[in-house]
Amino acid sequence: MKKILVAVLVLAMAFTMIACAKTTETEVTETEVVADETAATEAPAEEAMTVLTVAVDDTYPPMEYIDENGELVGFDVEMTLALAEKMGVEVEFISTGWDGIFAGLAAQQYDCIISSVSMTTDRLETMDFSKPYMANGQVIVVKPGDDSIATMEDLAGKTVGVQFATTADEAADKALEVVEFEKIAYDDMTTCLTAMKAGQVDCIVADYAVAIGAVQDDPTAYEISSVALTNEPIAIAVDKGNTALLDMLNAALDEVIADGTMSALSIKYMDVDLTQNIDTELR
């Protein structure tokens, strides 16, 4: 009888231990599931930006270019450094050819383009822009004393230089719909300016700021005519929908405009303040 009771007690204890073990295992499993579900639903914290990557076409004086010491300098370069200081980030400039600069932005190879980018209705469809920071339009640069170009129609029979795939190139194409002339497109603005100086073209179409810089650099070779083909203010280009970066850049722009940095830089590089009273109507 005692043996039977002992056997019964042993079996009872065994069942109790098995039941407890299953309960514990179930609780652990349920806890793990809850933990896994919580981890899956919690989004990782977004890391604060520490480095702003900026694409520049460094062949575009006085906005961005390589000086005689091999350093990247220019209005846009100094402005970018001032913006970065306000934003509390470092800057990495990425030298990029103009013909591929917008494709690189779309592919997120850099955060933004700060390289004398004109705002146009076409570009607004594929990228976002900061508030304009410089007045700009496409003007015609001639040789000093050449008063033969007073209207767009006076381009008839001329040889006109432009930088390839720029709004100057586009403006020349639109002019060709009205008047016949020869257009020669160059890979960069430095080559375009050199070609005019060498007499390979009669005139060039360029951003107003670039035209001012050319005249300052060599007034014996360049003069700005009275003809303006477009109005297209300059702004910072960012990838479409990147509102967080756009807000940061606009806030920083407000600060460097308010503290006089922008005006000082414009006068430094162009002897005139192009950062005030900007005509924002695109035409």
Image: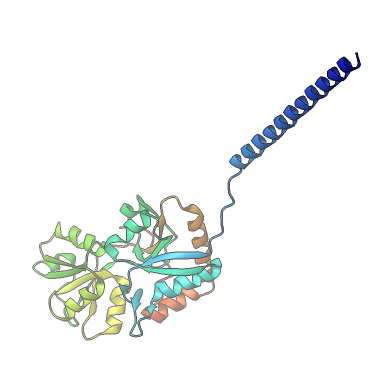
The relative height of residue 178 versus residue 148 in the rendered view (above or below) is: above
> Residue 183: x, y in percent?
14, 65
Left or right side of 150 for 5: right
Q: How is the image coloured?
A: rainbow
> Residue 88: x, y in percent?
56, 67
Q: Residue at x 20, y 72 (%)?
A: 204
Give the quadrant of the N terminus.
Answer: top right
Question: To which quarter of the image does residue 14 belong?
Answer: top right
Give the quadrant of the C terminus.
Answer: bottom left
> Residue 239: x, y in percent?
41, 54
The relative height of residue 263 versus residue 168 in the rendered view (above or below) is: below
The relative height of residue 55 versus residue 218 in the rendered view (above or below) is: above
- Foreground: 161 or 21? 21
Q: Residue at x 19, y 58 (%)?
A: 174
Most distant residue in the top direction: 1
- Foreground: 1 or 149? 1
Q: Residue at x 25, y 72 (%)?
A: 189
